[in-house]
Amino acid sequence: MSFADNWARVFVVITFLTFGETQIIGGIVPNLIAFGLFLGVIGYFAATGKMAEMFGWKDKK
């Protein structure tokens, strides 16, 4: 393996790391945001519905 081959491999790795990050930002971050919203909605309905009455978080009417 020559000196040029080593630098070509370094270039490929740096390029992959640079442009591969967009997949992480475009895939993981929106999924984490959606998952957080999903848990928030579950928490909202749990705190305001029958479950809240069952645990005594909300007064029964």
Image (cartoon, rainbow, N blue to C red):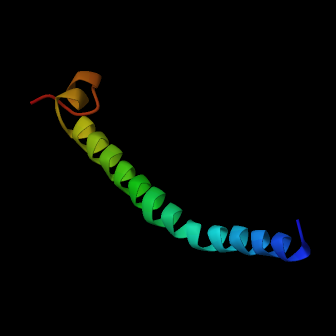
Q: Is residue 6 left or right of residue 42?
A: right
- Residue at the farthest top position: 54
Residue 42 lies, in percent from the top left, at 28, 40
Residue 13 lies, in percent from the top left, at 71, 67
On the image, which quarter does residue 39 sit in? top left
Camera-nearest residue between 31 and 54: 31
| Residue at left offset 33%, top offset 52% | 37
Residue 14 lies, in percent from the top left, at 71, 72
| Residue at left offset 57%, top offset 73% | 19
On screen, 53 above or below 27?
above
On screen, 13 above or below 47?
below
Camera-nearest residue between 6 and 58: 6
Residue 45 lies, in percent from the top left, at 22, 40
Q: Quadrant of the N terminus?
A: bottom right
Q: Quadrant of the C terminus?
A: top left
| Residue at left offset 78%, top offset 71% | 10
Q: Is residue 15 left or right of residue 38?
A: right
Camera-nearest residue between 10 and 42: 10
On the image, which quarter does residue 18 sit in? bottom right
| Residue at left offset 44%, top offset 59% | 27
- Residue at the farthest front position: 1
Q: Is residue 4 left or right of residue 18?
A: right
Instruction: Count all numbered tags in the image, as a single digit.
Output: 0
- Residue at the farthest left position: 61
